[in-house]
Amino acid sequence: MMETENQQIGNQIKPKTTILCSICDLAFTPSEQKTLICTNCIINQTDITIGITKEGIVNYCRFCHRYLRPPWTLCERESKELLSICLKRLRGLNKVKIIDAAFVYTEPSSKRIKVKLTIQKEVLNNTNMQQTFICEFLEHYQQCEDCKKEFTPHTWGAAVQIRQRVDHKKTFFYLEQLLLKYNANDKVLKIEQVDDGLDFFYKSRSHANRLVEYLSTILPIRVKQSKQLVSHDASSNLFNYKYVYAVDLPKVCKDDLVILPQKLCKELGGVGRVQLCYKLTTIVHLIDPLSMKCSDLSIEAFSLYENEIEVYNLKTHQHEFTVVDVERIHTRNLNESYISSSQNTFLPKLTKVTIIRESNNYVPITVKSHLGDILKTGQVAIGYDLTQLTIESLEDISNYPECILVKRQINKEARKLRIFKLKRLEAQNVMEEEGKEKKRNQQKKQNDQDEQFEEFLDDVEKDKEMRKNINLYRDEEKIKKLSKEDLKKKQMKQVQQQKKDDDDWQDEDEDDIKLEDLMKDLNLEDKPELAEPVDEAQEEINQFITKLEKVTIEK
C-alpha cells in the first residue's frame, strides 16, 4: 500500500511518498532507504561484526611479565599497551570504524582478558550502523628468548669471573653496592656466587666488556681473556665463541696490615716496610703508622712483588685497646715531606693516642694515629698488636710501632637502632654441599658471611666518604619496631655528646646517618620502564589508540 504526503520546499509543495515495511508494517520513505525494509528491521537483521574475530590468544611470559607484540614488551594489565596488543590480534577491524574500546574486569587468575568494542559501519545507502560486542583473549604462557637463555645452559655468550683470594668479603660488599647504585649489572643474565668471588654471565661480549671497563675505574684489577669455540659454519666461515674474562683483585683489602719488601720500599721513596691499607681504589693507598706518610701502590707494582708482599687481615689478628688520652698533633710540628705525601688527607686528624692493653698488664703506650676525628677518651679501639703477632719478617725490621690503631669499636647493641638497609644482588650459590656434615659447614660459612656484612654496615654507618657511593634505604620494619623513646634517646645522646666535645674536634656523631637522608620505597623487584608502542598494525587502529586518553574498566 502506498501513501502520499505533501512536503513544502520553499514556495513549492513536493509530494512525499511512504510505503509500509514488508516485515513490521511501519510506514517509511523508500526514497531515503532505497529498499523495501525500514531502518529498524535492517539493524535487527544485519550483523556488522561478521568477519571480525572475537577470540584470540596473547602470549605471556610469567618470568619477566612481558607480552609478545612482537617484540616482547612489558605491559601492565588493563593498560594502553596491552589494549594495543589485543586489538592487533583481531582480524577484520580495518573494514569498520572503531568508536570505543574498554577492558571488562576479569580476575588475573582466570587467564582471560575481555575487551568491549564499539564499532560503526555503513550498511546501506546513507545508513550507518553501530554495534557493541565483547572479545575474549586467552593468556598463553610462553617463555621469551631472554628467559630461555637464562634457564637453559650453554646459552651465555660471555662471562666475567671476579676473584679475590682473601678470607673476608669486604671488597665484594662494596663492589656490590657500586654495581647497584650505578646499574652496572642491568644486562646480566644470572649471577653465581663462589667461595672466592662472583661470576657474571652475559648474552654478548660487549655487555661483558662494559662491566670489565667499569671495574677498571673503581678497583685495581688484572684481566685475562680467553675464548672457546662453540660452533663453526664452514660454508659461511662463521665462528661462534664463548668469551671468559678472569678479573683478579689484589689480595689486600681496607684495614689490612701490609709488609712490603725492602726493594719496593725504596721504589716508593724510602717508606717503612710496615704499612696499613686505608683505602682501595684503582690503586692501593697505604699509610706508614710510624711516620704517618701516605704512599700509593699501583696494581703493576703489586703484581711484580706479589709473592714477597705479606698481608694480614684485621678480622683474624685484631686486638682491643682502651683509649686513655688523645692529644692533637699540630701541623706546625710536621715536616714538609709529610705534608706533601699526605696530600692534606689526614692533616686535621693526626693525634698522639695513649692506650692500654690487657696483654701488657695495662701499661700505657703512646702511638701515632690518623683517627683523631673519631677516637675519644674512654673508648675502645681495634687494631694490630705487633708484639703479639708471630711474623717472621718483623725480625728483620729494626723500627716499627708496637700497636697500630685501625678503627673504633662499635657496640653491637647499637645495631638494634640501625634504621637503614642495603640492597643485595640476587646471586645463586653454586657451592652448595650435600650431607649432614657438609651442610653444617655451609651453615657456618653463611653465618660468618652474615657477620662480615654486619661489620661492613658498621663501616658504612661511620664512614661518610664511603656512603657517597652507596644508596641507603629506610628499614621500615626496624623503624616501626623502634619506639619513639628509643629514637629520642638516640637524638639526646647526639646532642649531649656534641656539647661535651671541643670545637677543635669534629664530633663523632656528625657523620651518623639521619632518617631524612635515607631513600624511601625500597623495591627489590624494580621493573624496567614500559616500552613505547610500535606502529606495526593498521593505520586506523593506531589512530584510535593515540586518541585514547584513558582506559575505562567495567566491573
Image (tube, rainbow, N blue to C red):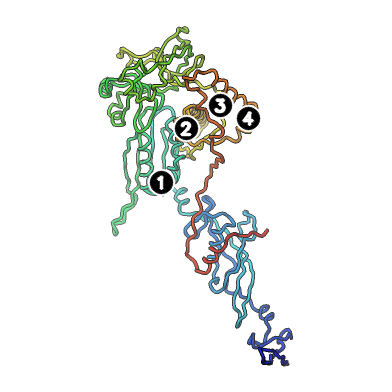
Name the quarter where the C terminus is drawn. Answer: bottom right
Identified by mark 1, the residue type is: Tyr
| Label 1, label 4: how far apart the Cα atoms are | 42 Å
- Asked whether the beta carbons under mark 2 and mark 4 sit within 8 Å of each other, the answer is no
SS state under label 3 = helix
Identified by mark 2, the residue type is: Arg
Identified by mark 3, the residue type is: Arg
Q: Residue at x 56, y 33 (%)?
A: 515
Q: Badge 4, how many Cα within 10 Å: few under 14, some, many 20+?
A: some
- The residue that disc 3 covers is 415
| Label 1, label 3: how far apart the Cα atoms are | 37 Å
Residue 74: image x %, image y %? Answer: 52, 54
Q: Badge 1, how many Cα within 10 Å: few under 14, some, many 20+?
A: many
SS state under label 4 = loop
Q: Is residue 400 visible?
A: yes
> From what the image shows, is residue 113 above or below residue 292?
below
- The residue that disc 1 covers is 202
| Label 2, label 4: how far apart the Cα atoms are | 24 Å
Q: Is residue 385 visible?
A: no
| Label 2, label 3: how far apart the Cα atoms are | 17 Å
Q: Which is nearer the N-term, disc 2 or disc 4?
A: 2
Q: Which mark is residue 467?
A: 2
Residue 468: image x %, image y %? Answer: 45, 34
Q: Nearer the viewer, residue 137 or 471?
A: 471
Q: Which mark is residue 482?
A: 4
Q: Which is nearer the N-term, disc 1 or disc 3?
A: 1
- Asked whether the beta carbons under mark 1 and mark 3 sit within 8 Å of each other, the answer is no
Q: Which is nearer the N-term, disc 2 or disc 3?
A: 3
Residue 233: image x %, image y %? Answer: 31, 56
Q: Which is nearer the N-term, disc 2 or disc 1?
A: 1
